[in-house]
Amino acid sequence: MVKSPVSGTASGFSGASAPPSDSRQRVSAFLQQLQDHICTGLEAADGQGTFQEDSWKREEGGGGRSRVLKSGGVFEQGGVNFSEVWGQELPPSILVQRPEAAGHGFYATGTSMVLHPHSPYIPTVHLNYRYFEAGPVWWFGGGIDLTPYYPFTEDVVHFHQTLKDACDRHHKEYYPTFKRWCDEYFYLKHRQETRGVGGIFFDYQDGTRSKLYHGPNPKTSSNPTGTAAQYSDAVGEISPRSWEEIFAFVQGCGNAFLPAYLPIIDRRQGLEWGDRQRDFQLYRRGRYVEFNLVYDRGTIFGLQTNGRTESILMSLPPLVRWEYSYQPEPNSPEAQLYETFLKSQDWLGGGF
Amino acid sequence: MVKSPVSGTASGFSGASAPPSDSRQRVSAFLQQLQDHICTGLEAADGQGTFQEDSWKREEGGGGRSRVLKSGGVFEQGGVNFSEVWGQELPPSILVQRPEAAGHGFYATGTSMVLHPHSPYIPTVHLNYRYFEAGPVWWFGGGIDLTPYYPFTEDVVHFHQTLKDACDRHHKEYYPTFKRWCDEYFYLKHRQETRGVGGIFFDYQDGTRSKLYHGPNPKTSSNPTGTAAQYSDAVGEISPRSWEEIFAFVQGCGNAFLPAYLPIIDRRQGLEWGDRQRDFQLYRRGRYVEFNLVYDRGTIFGLQTNGRTESILMSLPPLVRWEYSYQPEPNSPEAQLYETFLKSQDWLGGGF
């Protein structure tokens, strides 16, 4: 891996809470450990497949390591990427949100993952955590969200409860705020569906703000990609937090992934499935493609910054189906998915 | 079909060449006839499948008729749509190009088609012709382009020659200009590939300009979707043309589709193919999805104007595959497709 430029000095950052001088190295080291930890846990759960790694460099600065597991015992395809890139200026889609960064060099590092299991009874899952520094600003973003094909309430409750526990260790406003933000972000406006049952998502966490901002409401926003919308709709009040506090929270979220997901594999991998379930899974995977290519901020950032296309689009499913005017059979499990699981729900019953 | 508002009066349009008072009715009637004509020709070529029609209305104004043929003798899926919509104002992606239309109501009608054959030896093909009126401006746009999976030069030459002949009947600058525009528009910047072997494409043809503008060069443009780029790179000089002249040209282009495409089916449908060809076809279909969801102006317009999602996304293939880091075998037909057919080429040898 090419050595990244050193962090900005504390005096270069605005606000009360500047990052420490080794911020880049510490976040990058954590995100690489997270990639290792997740890959080890997934290989153990899969039982057959192993991750193949490609290391790559980016011409404008930086690089990464992409890991893919294909045709495993549980996973049809899984990708876990780490990347660390820098350059002269952030792309316009981000500068709209952080105009203070205009004209400054940037540093960005992240770990992202998407898993597509063979069994239609095991949900697809996505994780992404990222960190940016650009001129006077820095922030963390990311989240974890689940996309089931068949409606098992206990799996969704377990997933949300594990994330809530990880959030609650840091601040009681985190889970309700970031759960709602996730539902709004992973929303397909043109289908009027959530991508799945959500999880948590946040962006632009820089600690200097006294409110936890959530994203634009894509159901009412005129800019469904959210790239140019203003985050003016605050839902949680919170006192300013330090860089260390937010980094600790991000570490807690990253480490919550395996305990949130692996028990769902255990519960579902013995269930038999046939053509009907497989057809529905392939059809629903089309929504994943639609979301990632039409709305997803990480995908747009990657393509706009001449990122490595194969790594960015590793999130796309290995096999997908589209069917004109598909409608689920009434009172079927497929219909239940649409009626209950593809709408924002209060899975833990605590209100939101 | 809901009756559309009457055309603007001639005095409401800027420029020397205003549309006739029955412009909307005439274009709409032609585009519906084109849909009928294409569907009849395709059913005859398919031999087994028939188009099923859905008529639909749009809440804000207008509607359409969507026709789909599934699991035919030749076509795995084919969709031919007609739509006619109106509303209070064009979406921002178009107003950037036509700021004169801001604050005015708009009328838009179009016919579009995408065909996905079973045989990997028969290319996918796309047609779209459309007409807009908005305040003081009006324009025609559209084109036809071919996306082969296997490299048959004679098919591509026949296709381009038929389009060139149709263009040459109207103006000798049309084919070279609109052929180049097509190569630039149907370009996947993140893959550094053309979508296929092109054809012709044009937009914003309003007759009042003395140059034939082509689109932004997506290889160099910072806005790969082209939605905000300026059309400043003129390639052909031409004297102003009337609405009637441009409409006649669009009719000629629409009617050139069947003779450009059907002979390719005849030549290729007897060829046997196996898993290797099918796998490559499904993989390459992924590029079609990437183009339509990331770059295509028609798709973005449809989703932004609350169009009918099922009709807009009818262009997506019935079955698609993604494969991380796929590389064609050296010296194979698949490699030849990449080396020659996914780059802009002078198929007719006349220079461009």
Image (cartoon, coloured by chain):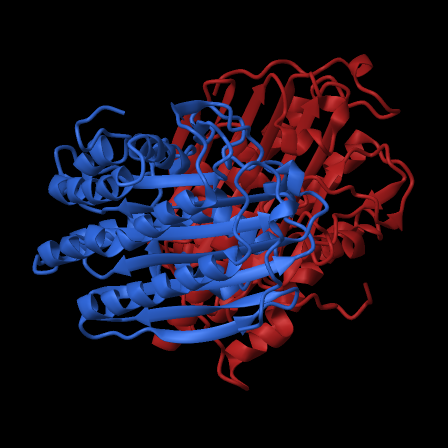
Chain colours: A red, B blue
Q: Quadrant of the C terminus of chain B?
A: top left
Residue sitting at 84 percent across and 52 percent down? A173
Q: Is residue B92 visible from the viewing direction of this image? A: yes
The image quarter in which residue A310 lies: top left
Q: Is residue A195 visible from the viewing direction of this image? A: no
**Residue A3 at x, y = what percent?**
53, 15
The image quarter in which residue A17 lies: top right
Q: Is residue B332 left or right of residue B79?
A: left
Query: Depth check: B139 or A88 in front?
Result: B139
The image quarter in which residue B267 lies: bottom left
Numbered label tally:
0
**Residue B38 at x, y = what percent?**
30, 63
**Residue A335 at x, y = what percent?**
54, 79
Q: Is residue B87 above or below residue A96?
A: below
Residue sitting at 43 percent across and 64 percent down? B29
Q: Is residue A332 above or below residue A142?
A: below
Q: Is residue A157 above or below residue A239?
A: below
Which residue is situated farthest in the bottom direction here? A331
Q: Is residue A277 left or right of residue A158?
A: left
Query: Depth check: A276 or A118 in front?
Result: A276
Query: Depth check: B258 or B17 in front?
Result: B17
Residue sitting at 42 percent across and 32 percent down? B189
**Residue A287 at x, y = what percent?**
50, 59
Residue sitting at 35 percent across and 35 percent down? B178
Q: Is residue B265 above or below residue A149?
A: above
